[in-house]
Amino acid sequence: MNNTIFLKTALVALTTSAYFGITSAAQAAIFTSKSAFLNATSGLTTVDFEGLTPPNTVASLNNSTISGVTFSDTQSFTLVLNCATFPNNFSNCNTTIPLVGPTSIASTGAASNTITATLPAGITAVGVDLLPYSLNQDYTVSISTGESETITINNDVKFIGFTSATPITSLSIFSTEGQVFDNLVYGQADVNPPPTGTPEPSAMLGLLAISGIGLSQLKRRKGK
């Protein structure tokens, strides 16, 4: 392949990759929009902790397997709480159940605790709803392939999800305060997920400018 054809091909690839948001296949994508995550995945299973314990009771989640996911934590203090008529005894029920419903959540009051969800084999997509244990609380969520995301919760629910071209074996949740979470979802990343949106006009102009500069350089070299 001569230099002219090679450079033209490289410019087209650069412009196309930037336009469609293509990243390296080895890099996991991180989602903070649950709807975008759902649009980029399929075959999902949701662990919602419902029906595991009667109303007004709690049960240990540590080393428990639910819907194929095994939960563990560094302080062996993660619980499933049924908040059906529990708000007076567990104050977080008042602020969390209205966000995710209907009755049950997973929680721990242990500070600086890491909760790990070990996934079934062959999973390439995973996400979780994070809930407030305290105001302005930071959560860090990471997966076995090395990617992580830190997000702040303030009396609301925040979602973090990941998709990867390689299997994800686990998801971990860390906070220096207690943790509350629900609706852990896992499945498969779509091979060709739908576009996440149209690039801004200014971005497209920049891409066209890059392409134009490269082509003008080709013309100059060809004319010499």
Image (spheres, rainbow, N blue to C red):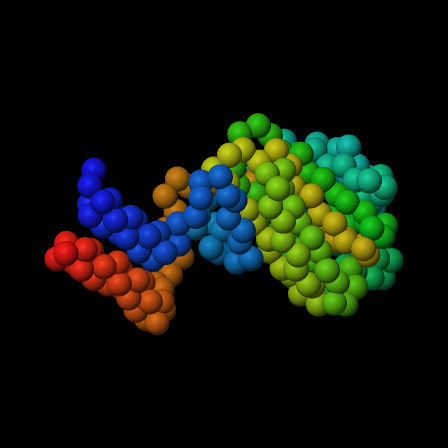
Q: Judge whether 75 appears above or below 21 on screen.
A: above
- Quadrant, the N terminus: top left
The residue at the point 86 percent across, 50 percent down is 110
Q: Is residue 190 left or right of residue 161?
A: left
- Looking at the image, the residue that sits furthest to the bottom is 202
Q: Judge whether 133 appears above or below 188 on screen.
A: below
Q: Quadrant of residue 19?
A: bottom left
The answer to which of 49 and 110 lies nearer the viewer is: 110
Q: Quadrant of residue 158?
A: bottom right
The answer to which of 61 and 125 lies nearer the viewer is: 125
Q: Is residue 192 left or right of residue 52?
A: left
The residue at the point 44 percent across, 40 percent down is 25
The residue at the point 82 percent across, 56 percent down is 177
Q: Is residue 190 left or right of residue 143?
A: left
Which percent across, then down, holds residue 36? 47, 55
Q: Quadrant of residue 80?
A: top right
Which percent across, then down, holds residue 2? 20, 41
- Looking at the image, the residue that sits furthest to the front is 224
Q: Is residue 128 left or right of residue 59?
A: left
- Quadrant, the C terminus: bottom left
The residue at the point 66 percent across, 49 percent down is 141
Res 118 visible: yes
Res 185 visible: no
The answer to which of 49 and 184 lies nearer the viewer is: 184
